[in-house]
Image: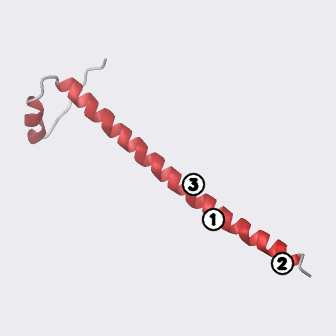
Amino acid sequence: MARINITLPDEIAERLSEKKNKSRFIAEALKERFIAEENAKLAKELEEGYKSVTREDKELLVEWKNAELDNWN
């Protein structure tokens, strides 16, 4: 376990003072935030990958369409 000192806005510090186990509450909140950030990053990477594959699929379709037409003579 690591011990850290942090500064919080007064409003948040007041709400946190109501919690019995402040350390656990903060740790759980941070863990949820980290997971949400990782999920957002993954969603963005998946979207970019999908767009890339879609672009490649369209290019491949054009290539095959041209190849099919060449054999119709």
Across and down, in percent, residue 6 comes to: 20, 31
In the visual, does 7 lie left or right of 42? left
Residue at 9% of width from left, 30% of height from top?
17
Mark seen at residue 49: 3
In the visual, does 8 lie left or right of 38? left
Mark seen at residue 3: none
Compared with 59, 1 (above or below) is above
Q: Could you say whether the residue bearing mark 1 is in a helix, strand or loop?
A: helix
Type of amino acid at the residue the image marks with label 3: Gly
Residue 66 appears anywhere in the view:
yes
Crowdedness of circle 2 by 10 Å Cα count: few (<14), some, many (20+)? Answer: few
Across and down, in percent, residue 34 comes to: 36, 38
Residue at 89% of width from left, 79% of height from top?
72
Nearest the viewer among 19 and 1 is 19
Of labels 3 and 2, earlier in sequence is: 3
Residue marked by disc 1: 55
Crowdedness of circle 1 by 10 Å Cα count: few (<14), some, many (20+)? Answer: few
Type of amino acid at the residue the image marks with label 2: Leu
Across and down, in percent, residue 8 comes to: 16, 37
Task: State the image quarter where residue 15 is shown.
Answer: top left
In the visual, does 20 lie left or right of 44? left
Across and down, in percent, residue 9 comes to: 13, 41
Residue 5 appears anywhere in the view:
no
Task: State the image quarter where residue 13 is shown.
Answer: top left
Type of amino acid at the residue the image marks with label 1: Arg
Q: Are marks 1 and 3 in contact (CB under 8 Å)?
A: no
Residue at 90% of width from left, 75% of height from top?
71
